[in-house]
Amino acid sequence: MKSSAEKVTQLIEPTVQALDLELWGVEHASQGKYSVLRIFIEREAGVTIDDCERVSRQASAIFDVEEPIAGEYTLEVSSPGIDRLLFTPQQFQRYRGEEVSVRMRTPVDGRRKFKGTLTDVVDDIIHIQVDGSDFELPHGDIEKANIVY
């Protein structure tokens, strides 16, 4: 069964690409009956407010028909920013050598939070060095990860 973020990604990725942008990622955060759907877009030359508005309008039209998320939610569209979230192994690959913060769904070696240098990505395993120790984190078990600015 797909998560709401996966459904949204599948629905809007072709539209975002048609607008000459990259869909960086989708985050759906719900707290009680309130939820926020965040769509992160990227472009080499940078993302403008106009880009965000265009994606927001297109996404809203698609969601009105498809309804990928039950109930009410707030839609936000933005660039990933300087402390960007990392969603895919390919994105991790782009930031090898950078400092990252990673929170796991299940503990690895007794811990869920890791902050250190991203050393490599091999077969969807994220390699991170924390205080001189190397950790191998399965991408599928990552709850949240971002660049440390």
Image: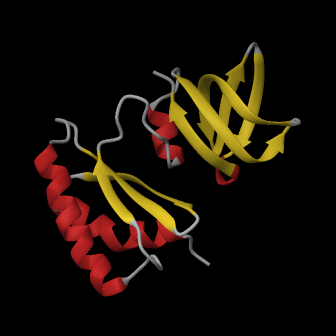
Q: How many marks?
A: 0
Residue pictured at 32% horizontal, 65% vertical: 13
Give the residue at the far top of this rendering: 132
Give the residue at the far front of this rendering: 33
Give the residue at the far bottom of this rendering: 65
> Residue 115, relative to residue 93: is it above or below?
above
What's the coloring here?
secondary structure
> Horizontal placement of 119 versus 86: left or right?
right
> Residue 131, relative to residue 27: is it above or below?
above
Residue pictured at 42% horizontal, 73% vertical: 72
Residue 20 quadrant:
bottom left
Give the residue at the far left of this rendering: 50
Could you say where residue 60 lies in the image, as x and y percent from the top left?
A: 25, 72
Residue pictured at 48% horizontal, 44% vertical: 90
Most foreground residue, 125 or 82: 82
> Horizontal placement of 55 versus 129: left or right?
left
> Horizontal placement of 102 versus 65: left or right?
right
Quadrant of image for the C terminus = top left
> Residue 67, relative to residue 113: is it above or below?
below
Q: Is residue 5 visible?
A: yes
Residue 103 quadrant:
top right
Could you say where residue 68 lies in the image, as x and y percent from the top left?
A: 43, 78
Most foreground residue, 33 or 36: 33
Q: Is residue 123 visible?
A: no
Could you say where residue 95 lies in the image, as x and y percent from the top left?
A: 47, 29
> Residue 101, relative to residue 39: is it above or below?
above
Residue 79 quadrant:
top left
Quadrant of image for the N terminus = bottom right
Residue pictured at 27% horizontal, 78% vertical: 62
Could you say where residue 83 lies in the image, as x and y percent from the top left?
A: 43, 30
